[in-house]
Image (cartoon, rainbow, N blue to C red):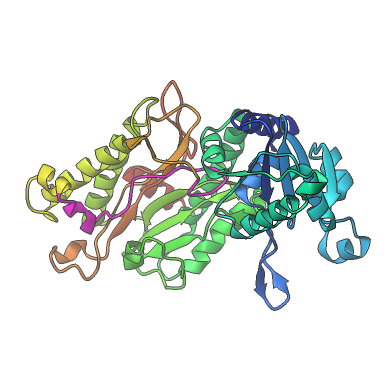
Amino acid sequence: MEISRHTYLERRKSLMAQLPEKSVVVLRTGELATRNNDCDYEFRPHSSFFYLTGFPEPSAYAFISGEGELTLLTLPKDPEKEQWEGFRHGRQGAIETFGAAQAAVIEELAPTAFDLLNGAQQVVYLFSDAELQQQIAQWRDALAAKARAGAIAPTHMQDLEPLVADMRLIKDAEEIAIMERAAQISVAAHQQAMSSVHPGMYEYQLEAELNYVFMKSGARQPAYNNIVASGANACVLHYIKNDEEIAEGDLVLIDAGAELGCYAADITRTFPANGKFSEPQAALYQLVLDAYHAGLKELQVGTAYEAFHNAAVEVLTTGLVNLGLLQGEPKALIENKAYRDFYMHNTGHWLGLDVHDCGTYKVAGESRPLQAGMVLTIEPGLYVSKDNLSVDKKWRGIGIRIEDDVLIREQGPYVLTHGLAKEITEIEALMSKG
């Protein structure tokens, strides 16, 4: 399940069509990162580089010009190094496999850059890449110094981020297919965890169940650090220690998603370690689930992005008042953001090549209207600190989040992470079979 070479070319053509003539786009994929001493982390290309080229290797540069013509600078073929480090595509592979119009080895970067930038009026790159920014400035200055010999240095710079972010925000059919597959691998991993949990096991043992399903299904790594949080740990939003024993009566919050073909899934489920929600746990869980359903209804083409968050907040705040965790009129509590003592994050984010994918949430100062092809998460939650003395003891230390991945479609929202239990009865039934 891959993106076709034709699709990468069409993306580059679309990008260049948005730019003035004589523009050149420059990107780099990144370098291997050292884990410790002489051991490296597994390489993962920069998302926007990958989006426009599909090239997976480190230490590569891409120049895009004309009507999407690609020039790739790659590591050279080297039988001795490939014996130790693995296969390299090299110059020939860049052309034959990835559709580059031209290719060279990385040692030829400077002369290739001079040739491609000579006569260009504008260079487009990610302003966030400080190292590349410095290189481009050096290339530009070197060309300017050769003006008497006829060289013409570019005079304008443009940030690539807004352009590529808007492109990445709308997923095509190939991307959606990969994302749904990543989502369904993640569903299977969560089902395995729900079926395997029991009081007395450790959070990392439950994490192992997730990683086993990810890897055996072809997703070699999670899309982000797995969160396996039992008891009050679930009130820590980005808890990743995953090293405590799961106790009788604990809820377990798992926030974990697979990465497949560089595309992320992102799921959260909360369930009782012993297979049965207590009354306080069930009351708060049902409130979060009601907020989820209220938010999901708002995920329609043309609706403002913020609408699903607002709908979830209204349900949560009203419910907190009804349960006695907040006092006052819900409308005033929402205006004063009193709910943030229990719900301190937004109800979703864009999803794609990055788990928190690129793309603005506002356009011209207004909440962005949803469009077909967008993929986002919906993830309401409630977190009652174990140290919160303003609420009844029975609520303290309960953390709950429910999260799915949703594709925006003309005919209504489509949950990519379909099939994973959310209702209390569904969860308890699944766990009883474990």
Question: Which segment did they paint magenta?
Answer: 336-357
The answer to which of 252 and 354 lies nearer the viewer is: 354
In this rendering, the count of numbered labels is 0
Point 33% across, 37% down: residue:
365
Q: Is residue 102 left or right of residue 177?
A: right
> Is residue 403 at least partly visible in the picture?
yes
Percent from the top left, x then y, of residue 179? Answer: 57, 39
| Up-down relation of residue 184 to residue 18 (above or below) | below
For the N terminus, the quadrant is: top right
Q: Residue furthest right?
A: 79
The answer to which of 141 and 148 lies nearer the viewer is: 148
| Up-down relation of residue 133 to residue 305 (above or below) | below
| Up-down relation of residue 252 to residue 10 (above or below) | below
Q: Is residue 83 left or right of residue 407?
A: right
Percent from the top left, x then y, of residue 120? Answer: 70, 39
Q: Is residue 56 left or right of residue 165?
A: right
Q: Residue furthest bottom?
A: 37
Point 22% across, 65% down: residue:
396
| Up-down relation of residue 401 to residue 80 (above or below) | above
Would residue 173 be counted in the magenta stretch? no
Give the main secondary structure of the magenta stretch: loop
The answer to which of 174 and 27 lies nearer the viewer is: 27
> Is residue 44 at least partly visible in the picture?
no
Point 32% across, 47% down: residue:
380
